[in-house]
Amino acid sequence: MVTWFSRRVFQAFFIVVAMSIIVFLGVFAIGDPVEMLVPPDADQIEKARAIAVLGLDQPLWKQYLTFVANAVRGDFGNSFVFDIPALQLIVQRLPATLELAVFAVLLSVVLGIPLGIYAGLYPDQIISRTIMAGSILGFSLPSFWVGLVLIMFFGVYLGWLPSNGRGDTVSVLGVEWSFLTWDGIRHMLLPALNLSLTNIAMVLRLTRAGVREALQMDYVKFARAKGLHPARIVGVHVLKNIMIPIVTVVGLDFGSTIAFSVVTENIFAWPGMGKLIIDSISVLDRPVMVAYLILVVVMFAMINLIVDVVYMLLDPRVRGRAIS
Amino acid sequence: MHMTRKIAHGRLLAAASAITLACLATATQAATLRIGTATPATSADPYFQNATPNNVLARHIFEPLVVFDEKQVLAPALAESWRMTDSLTWEFKLRPNLVFSDGSPLTSEDVVASIERAAKADSPGSVQANVKTVVSTEAPDPLTVIMKTATPDMLLPAQLTRVAIISKQFKSAPTTDFNAAKATLGAGPYILTEYVPGDRAVMKRNDKYWGPKQAWDEVILKATPDDAARTASLLAGDVDLIEGVSPTDVERLKGISDVKIVSAPSNRMVYLAPNQGVDTNSFITDKSGKPLEKNPFQDVRVRQAVSHAINREAIVDRVMDGFALPTAQWLATGRYGTAPGVAPDTYDPELSKKLLAEAGYPDGFSITAHASNNRYINDAKIIQAVAQMLSRVGIKTKAEALPWATFQPKANAGEFAIVLGAWGANTGETSVPMTATLATRDAARGRGASNYAGYSNPEFDKLLGAAQNELDPDKRNKALGKAAGFAISDKALIPLHHEVSIWAAKASMDYVPRADQYTLAIGATPSGN
């Protein structure tokens, strides 16, 4: 158990180091951060001063070592653009993205699993066929287009929901959350729907496939023969046995929703981390890029860890192997 | 849960009063102006970064000594008059009885503190560059400021339009205090109440503003970077005014009765810079792909051929949807520092072919033309149109569009054959663009910093230098015009057009568009007022 755990931690650490080196090299391969920050009419003297201020006049290896020395103390440097600590900038945006991601994942589970179960139990009904056809649209339509369509339909034509931005927030434990206000929820609905469409489609299809497969299994036949209530058969016996792939997908989706909800956040002007990372890449804000990607690696490692632990809870066979 | 009758009664009363208050509130509706901007400000500190979104925010809450009006003519703001008392000294006279938004007096000492803080601002791209010629600032009396410069600086008033005047008590305040709205005490038309970096700024009216009374109780600047989403937010009624409307959206918006389109020519000139600074370039080849031994762009006839091959009207009409003005120089002919009597080159492909033959390229040659794809309006489309036009006269052109972050350093290093550039003449005259893009590169003296074309002509440098040393405004105007005329006839750059900036607003308000592309609440008033 312990060796398995420490092996995972070591792997994550190695990836973090590799990631930081790649970003450092990558930024300079793309272009010059200073050119993005100074006004177009800045002369060479102004640019030289800016380069010195940002520490970019040092050789690259020296810049990297300075970065590592500070990073182990928790200081990832100041954003080139905002001049506030990169970590602080990311953490400021984290609640917004977290709310959106959790809401999106909740939607995908709450909508995807029941719809998938229905489609699996009664595959020949018209409703089931419609659900499956809808799911194809769900993961083939590009999310920026769907986002704009949602804005036009619900924001402009119907005027029911706001077209962009985050709603009013309430401070809890020093952090601003918007899901605690009605205005906040109204602002969250469209972006969360946009973000979750692909996930709903995938969870739906996985659930349906799992249900179809599980219904053929012997234990389901025995349970029916025994006279168990159908709800119990589906809710306990079938569901528990099909959850492993679903949990994997939901876990991975959660990670990538948090890390890369760039398109949705950009369209809906949602002040989250996804928008921060794409803006930082456009202007080559290296400290923010490095800090963000390291955080993302750590987060994915943690999520994979949690998913593995959940496997063990769900599947006794995995539990046995881990212990032995 | 059951309530006692008293509590239930109390709650009913509270609900009733809340409803009444809500009705009253809508009756005396607070006039809020919500502006959808394209890029968020990076700080509420006016000296942190000299970038348009930051300057726009600063103009709402602070006031500089002088400002540019919407036609980019210098106008008095906190200073009611200014003059050069000798070649190295400027004297500014402040308006009497100026106050900050909290009522405290604004005197020359605040101006001195502001200039000193600006000079110490060391973030990249800070306003320090705007006050770099100032060596000392004095306040001999509360209404007079004397600034001494290291060299004669005719442009100081124009540079000072970027220097907001802050209160002297915040002279050493760090940027974080400004972002937290603690140090943002200013004399502007609005007061900053909330600033979220990279997202929005919320302001309320400053009733002690020296200028005309503002119509809006509250102004919110909200950043929505995606063009389509920004237009949608106007249509949904979530904002009242948006900037940076894409020309393709204009047709659709024109058909909607409660939206109006407002546009104005900007001072941003879009041009082509043929690389004349190198003898060979990997992107200039003969028809078979072998790099040419001599750079054809070093021959003025080839540059003339390129200029005549371009149908500027077609670009304006088809690529820019009519939202551009063909141009021959940095500012419209007649403005300060422009060459007199110059018009955009005619579209004459036959002449181009003749010139190319004369220069020794009767069969033309091959080039790749580069542009950015995310910086200027339709930059990628313009370069594609240019490539087609050049190909028609025999210069087989391939177009490449790159993100700005990748394009700019390479273009500035002279790695490309011909590039698309743009320059907004922020000082309302031509000496700054000419120094940056046409003067021979001289890093020590800060000349030629954006000289993509690698242009270096001693005759031009002499004319420009003489113009910059000229202190008499009329003589300077003529001298700059002479230098500009020289560069134009030498075809150092190939100007295409001036961008026209487009705003869209609710039909219930009027908006005065600006040549510097700033979106300011002072330009917006409810219609019929």
Image (spheres, rainbow, N blue to C red):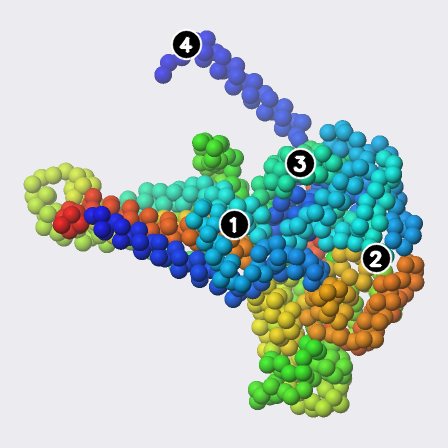
Residue appearing at x 43%, y 9% in the figure: B5
**Chain for numbered disc 3:** B
Mark 3 belongs to which amino acid?
A: Ala
Instruction: Find numbered disc 2 in the image and state the secondary structure of the residue it sits on.
Output: loop
Mark 3 vs mark 1, CA separation in Å: 24 Å
**Labels 4 and 2: the sequence-earlier one:** 4
- The label number, if any, that marks residue B183 in the structure image: 3
Mark 3 vs mark 4, CA separation in Å: 50 Å
User: Disc 4 or disc 1, which is closer to the eye?
Assistant: 1
> Both on one chain, marks 4 and 1?
no
> Both on one chain, marks 3 and 1?
no
Instruction: Find numbered disc 1 in the image and state the secondary structure of the residue it sits on.
Output: loop
Instruction: Find numbered disc 3 in the image and state the secondary structure of the residue it sits on.
Output: loop
**Chain for numbered disc 4:** B
Mark 4 vs mark 1, CA separation in Å: 59 Å
Whether residue B5 is situated above or below residue A259 in the rendered picture:
above
- The label number, if any, that marks residue A77 in the structure image: 1
Q: Residues within 10 Å of mark 2 (few under 14, many from 20)?
A: few
Q: Position of residue B323 (x, y in %)?
A: 70, 61
For residue A91, side relative to residue A3 (left or right): right
**Chain for numbered disc 1:** A
Which residue is denoted by mark 2 in the rendering?
Answer: B151
Q: Residues within 10 Å of mark 4 (few under 14, many from 20)?
A: few
- The label number, if any, that marks residue B4 in the structure image: 4
Mark 2 vs mark 3, CA separation in Å: 33 Å
Mark 4 vs mark 2, CA separation in Å: 82 Å
Mark 1 belongs to which amino acid?
A: Gly
